[in-house]
Image (tube, rainbow, N blue to C red):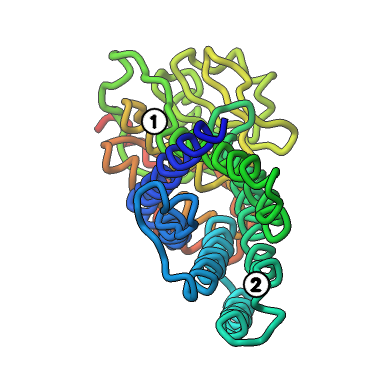
């Protein structure tokens, strides 16, 4: 059994740590989001872990007097990147308070590392030395996991990403004590490797989330191209017809999806923005209930749909998205969708009541989404 542990733990750790880094690095490259850059850097540090149980099988050893300091330092570095990155993923930016907390955290980390490196007796005890970094590291992973729960769809494999991180974080909270219990240490290391492996599986699914490929006939170019603003769905119908019944449409809506089911074309892809439920509503047509705060994953899903042939993006959930995310983050979302759709020679239909916007917000939307002119229907 000990031989199995000795082989299984390093292998699982090596695969899962590097998978997490590669997946998050790819997500950072794809989204160009600061949060994912910070998270990928944290996972890279994790992939270069200096635990003896990881290094010994590959013949690498640290100097005995340097090991304790070297093993607590990465926890602080990863924790600050996990927390900062998670805040960016959740909010799209960091506030003054976030920078202040990061600064205080950095100073506390430095003082703690200084104490561990000193000759003070209490900090020569590994349980004491690991206590604060393990606590902060564990809590940072748990927080990241909870943030990612809002960014993933329930009842799907990518949900393993946040849950694996939460379990790993909870296990790390016990590390200062359980690491030095002889009978439990191998079990704890195996559980950590398994939780990390679970997270890695979910991360791969999360980054490469599959949107089903539409039929060939839906990949023809949209006859009307551009990004247009309408005041109501009825106005859309009068101007360009019923978008919901077109094949190859992506619908981001607040309408009651059960009542609207008869209008939805089987080859449409629908994201019902709601807090009432989450996950798959229907396979044909494809309907998913998505949390209004899951803007990042929604952007990724729209991008995948456009890559696979969808050419019309209809959005009537703007007011709700603004309410839940703020205007700036919502504006960034619809601009991303607009750019992707126009690059695919498609059409964006934005339905918004100007009554909910102030003059500045109205001006920003009008600069990006023009009123529809009837002569465009024959272009």
Left/right of residue 341 with respect to residue 195 in the rendered view: left
In what element is the residue under mark 2?
A: helix
Residue at point 42%, 29% (across, down): 240
Residue at point 38%, 33% (across, down): 304
181 lies above or below 280: below
Left/right of residue 146 with respect to residue 351 in the rendered view: right
Residue at point 63%, 21% (across, down): 281
Q: Which of the image's four quarters has the C terminus?
A: top left
Residue 116, percent across and down? 60, 79
Residue at point 58%, 86% (across, down): 118
Q: Alpha carbon of mark 1 to alpha carbon of mark 2: how far?
A: 50 Å
Closer to the camera: disc 1 or disc 2?
2
Is mark 1 in CB contact (under 8 Å) with mark 2?
Answer: no
Residue 365 in sight from this viewpoint: no
Specify the label residue 129 is tagged with. 2
Residue 100, percent across and down? 62, 81
140 lies above or below 250: below
Along the viewing direction, whichever of 238 and 169 lies nearer the viewer: 169
Residue tagged by mark 1? 305
Residue 23, percent across and down? 40, 44
Left/right of residue 308 with respect to residue 271 in the rendered view: left
**Which mark sits nearer the N-terminus, 1 or 2?**
2
């Amino acid at each position: 059994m000990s031989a199995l542990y000795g082989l299984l733990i390093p292998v699982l750790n090596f695969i899962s740590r590097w998978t997490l880094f590669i997946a998050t690095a790819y997500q950072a490259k794809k989204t160009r989001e600061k949060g994912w850059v910070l998270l990928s850097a944290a996972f890279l540090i994790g992939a270069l872990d200096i635990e003896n149980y990881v290094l010994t099988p590959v013949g690498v050893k640290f100097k005995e007097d340097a090991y304790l300091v070297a093993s607590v330092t990465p926890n602080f570095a990863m924790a600050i990147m996990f927390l900062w990155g998670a805040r960016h993923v959740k909010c799209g930016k960091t506030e003054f308070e976030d920078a202040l907390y990061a600064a205080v955290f950095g100073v506390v980390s430095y003082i703690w590392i200084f104490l561990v490196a000193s000759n003070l007796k209490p900090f020569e005890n590994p349980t004491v030395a690991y206590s604060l970094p393990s606590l902060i590291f564990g809590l940072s992973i748990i927080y990241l996991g909870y943030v990612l729960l809002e960014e993933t769809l329930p009842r799907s494999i990518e949900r393993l990403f946040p849950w694996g991180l939460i379990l790993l974080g909870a296990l790390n909270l016990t590390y200062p004590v359980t690491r030095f219990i002889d009978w439990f240490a191998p079990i704890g290391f195996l559980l950590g490797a398994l939780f990390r492996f679970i997270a890695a599986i979910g991360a791969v699914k999360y980054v490469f989330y599959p949107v089903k490929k539409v039929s060939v006939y839906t990949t023809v170019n949209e006859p009307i191209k551009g990004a247009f603003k309408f005041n109501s769905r009825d106005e859309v119908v009068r101007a360009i017809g019923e978008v919901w019944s077109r094949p190859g449409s992506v619908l981001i809506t607040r309408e009651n999806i059960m009542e609207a089911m008869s209008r939805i074309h089987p080859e449409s892809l629908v994201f019902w923005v709601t807090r009432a439920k989450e996950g798959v509503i229907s396979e044909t047509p494809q309907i998913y209930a998505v949390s209004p705060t899951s803007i990042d994953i929604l952007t990724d899903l729209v991008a995948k749909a456009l890559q696979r042939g969808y050419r019309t993006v209809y959005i009537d959930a703007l007011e709700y998205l603004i309410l839940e995310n703020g205007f700036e983050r919502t504006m960034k979302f619809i601009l991303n969708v607009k750019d992707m759709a126009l690059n695919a020679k498609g059409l964006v239909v934005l339905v918004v009541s100007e009554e909910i916007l102030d003059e500045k917000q109205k001006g920003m939307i009008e600069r990006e989404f023009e009123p529809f002119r009837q002569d465009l229907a024959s272009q």
